[in-house]
Image: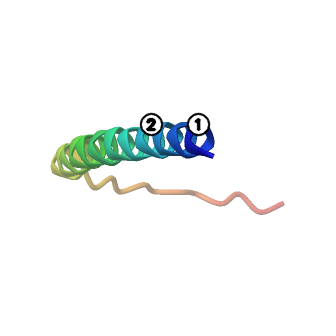
Amino acid sequence: MSTFLNVLLVILFIVVIALAVLYFLGRKLEKRQVEQQQALEAAAQTVSMLVIDKKR
């Protein structure tokens, strides 16, 4: 029973570490996405288009 408990604890420890790494990577990528979105909005331009409809 002790071996099973040790294996279970090691697996749980690995899962916790993996979740922590994914959490911090996700926050970093989210910050990068927000910065890119702000840069995109700052570079956005309004375009006026004149469309002539030719009726037959």
Mark 2 residue type: Ile
- The answer to whether residue 50 is above or below residue 22 is below
User: Is 51 on the left or on the right of 24, as rendered?
Assistant: right
What residue is drawn where x is 42% and y is 55%? 49
Helix, strand or loop status at disc 2: helix
The residue lying toward the viewer, choosing from 54 and 10, is: 10
Q: To which residue does mark 1 refer?
A: 3
Occupied quadrant, residue 17: top left
Occupied quadrant, residue 7: top right
Q: To which residue does mark 2 refer?
A: 14
Q: Quadrant of the C terminus?
A: bottom right
Alpha carbon separation for disc pair 1 and 2 = 17 Å
The residue lying toward the viewer, choosing from 8 and 43, is: 8
Mark 1 residue type: Thr
Residue 5 % position (x, y): 55, 46
Residue 36 % position (x, y): 24, 42
